[in-house]
């Protein structure tokens, strides 16, 4: 499918074939930079950066200039009408009537989806809080491909802040899709959030092996290794001798080590910041002397702080400045394709089948538990209705449609007051049999008993918490 008029909000918006085709177009454009100047003449790109940025903003702006287009820009929420209380949706509608394409970075997770929903022109996510940064992922993959020709079958270690780092979140989904194995090497306390692991395992079909130093035959390499994601179809024989085959695989070496800085601006509490600062692992010459790093590409989205030693800058394995430079041709290829001035032709249409989860949307009841989610931040303004995908019914698990946080809500009820069985409005524990009994279109989900109470629902025998009355099953006939 052509990319014209589409938006790039998460890395899932591109199939493997589309990513490959963008890389070919980026190759073509960098071979003849001077010839691209006529492509976007007359086109205007809005560049909205409501969080600090050097590389991403300037490489996007360089990209549109090299394509012959021009830029309008805003870099500070305080200097826009958002500071007067304007909604993101209104801002998107207005800017969409000025510009042909919008590039936006915003501190709220899911904010770029809102812009894409309302702008009416293609929107590119240049980083939304700790959620995703898909164009960084494109240039990361492009860098690896240039050095290794393929992504499939590689072993890529992700290092540092895997909890709040949006670059690693987008990258791990892309790596899983493209068939690489991932070694998770987090700074202690900054491990990959469980909902991201759940998505990797259930939707990308790989396996996660938790590394257990005490019971593993595998020598601990790299030093902060916490878990390994093994992509489906990779040549591991994990069912037979898991530890030994892993040992053999790791001894062949790590193909890329992707280092990230602590995302201090997103740390929940100063305690989290202080602790991780003290324990944050550093990549330096000494670490890279280990045999498994002999041919490793050292990568970093930049900016670096103290986690990547300056002594490595002249090391031939270091890729981070090259990575930043490749951001321009990749972004040129993307902008030109979304604007429809260049058409890419993906060789294969091999993205994962879209998982069709039932959607849950109501004006009241459950809210996304992520305080940095746009649906939490914008609820004061009435247009934005919280929306969730029901990704599992047992235990009932929701995923926010904006920031993609997954969680297990506690209470449920039915708009039909229990499918016509009961006369009264009652709510139940989400882990009772009612969760499967209530039709999805009738489902009401609550975060708390007080919220259910405020909407006129009373606890059934199946509501746990302060009303818990023991065994579910025995109460069934009484209830009915
Ligand atoms: C990253 C970002 O903003 O998420 N930087 C970038 O875009 N190159 C990484 C970071 O800030 O740590």
Image (tube, rainbow, N blue to C red):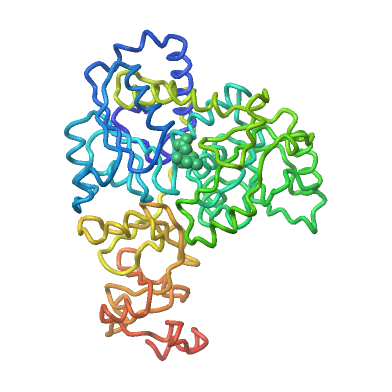
Residues 319 and 38: in front is: 319
Marks counted in the figure total: 0
Residues 17 and 161: in front is: 161
Residue visible at 47% across and 44% down? Answer: 166
Quadrant for the N terminus, please. Answer: top left
- Say if residue 138 shows up in the picture: yes
Quadrant for the C terminus, please. Answer: bottom left
Residue 45 horizontal/vertical position (percent): 27, 28
Residue 37 horizontal/vertical position (percent): 32, 12
Residue 57 horizontal/vertical position (percent): 37, 32
Q: Where 340 falls versus 50 (above or below)?
A: above
Horizontal side of residue 105 vs 306, given as left or right: left
Q: In which quarter of the image is residue 457?
A: bottom left
Residue visible at 55% across and 44% down? Answer: 261
Q: Where 233 falls versus 478 (above or below)?
A: above
Q: Where 20 falls versus 288 (above or below)?
A: above
Residue visible at 37% across and 48% down? Answer: 107
Horizontal side of residue 236 vs 24, given as left or right: right
Q: In which quarter of the image is residue 157?
A: top right
Horizontal side of residue 107 vs 379, given as left or right: right
- Say if residue 2 shows up in the picture: no
């Amino acid at each position: 499918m052509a990319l014209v008029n589409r938006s790039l909000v998460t890395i899932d918006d591109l199939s493997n074939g589309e990513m490959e085709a963008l890389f070919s177009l980026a190759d073509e454009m960098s071979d003849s930079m001077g010839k691209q100047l006529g492509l976007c003449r007359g086109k205007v790109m809005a560049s909205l950066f409501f969080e600090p940025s050097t590389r991403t903003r300037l490489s996007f702006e360089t990209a549109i200039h090299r394509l012959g287009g021009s830029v309008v820009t805003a870099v500070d929420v305080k200097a826009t009408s958002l500071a007067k209380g304007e909604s993101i949706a209104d801002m998107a509608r207005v800017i969409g009537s000025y510009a042909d394409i919008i590039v936006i970075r915003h501190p709220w997770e899911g904010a770029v989806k809102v812009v894409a929903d309302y702008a009416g022109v293609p929107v590119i996510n240049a980083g939304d809080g700790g959620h995703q940064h898909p164009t960084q992922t494109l240039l990361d993959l492009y860098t690896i491909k240039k050095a290794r020709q393929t992504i499939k079958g590689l072993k890529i270690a992700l290092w540092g802040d895997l909890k709040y780092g949006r670059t690693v979140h987008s990258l791990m989904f892309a790596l899983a899709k493209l068939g690489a194995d991932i070694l998770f090497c987090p700074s202690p306390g900054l491990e990959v959030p469980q909902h991201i692991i759940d998505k990797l395992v259930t939707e990308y079909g790989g396996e996660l092996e938790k590394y257990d130093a005490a019971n593993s035959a595998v020598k601990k390499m790299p030093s902060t290794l916490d878990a390994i994601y093994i992509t489906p179809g990779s040549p591991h024989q994990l069912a037979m001798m898991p530890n030994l085959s892993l040992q053999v695989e790791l001894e062949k070496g790590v193909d890329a080590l992707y280092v990230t800085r602590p995302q201090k601006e997103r740390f929940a509490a100063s305690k989290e910041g202080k602790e991780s600062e003290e324990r944050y692992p550093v990549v330096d010459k000494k670490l890279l002397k280990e045999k498994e790093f002999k041919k490793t590409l050292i990568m970093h989205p930049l900016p670096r702080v103290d986690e990547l030693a300056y002594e490595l800058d002249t090391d031939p394995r270091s890729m981070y400045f090259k990575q930043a430079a490749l951001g321009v041709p990749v972004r040129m290829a993307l902008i030109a394709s979304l604007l429809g001035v260049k058409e890419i032709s993906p060789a294969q249409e091999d993205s994962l089948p879209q998982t069709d989860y039932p959607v849950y949307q109501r004006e009241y009841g459950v809210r996304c538990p992520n305080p940095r989610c746009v649906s939490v931040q914008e609820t004061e303004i009435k247009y934005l209705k919280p929306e969730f995908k029901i990704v599992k019914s047992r235990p009932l698990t929701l995923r926010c449609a904006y920031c993609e946080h997954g969680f297990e809500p506690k209470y449920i009820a039915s708009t039909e007051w229990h499918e016509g069985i009961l006369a009264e409005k009652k709510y139940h524990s989400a882990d009772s049999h009612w969760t499967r009994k209530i039709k999805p279109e009738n489902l009401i989900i609550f975060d708390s008993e007080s919220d259910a109470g405020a909407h006129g629902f009373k606890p059934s025998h199946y509501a746990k918490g302060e009303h818990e009355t023991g065994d579910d099953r025995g109460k069934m006939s009484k209830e009915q």
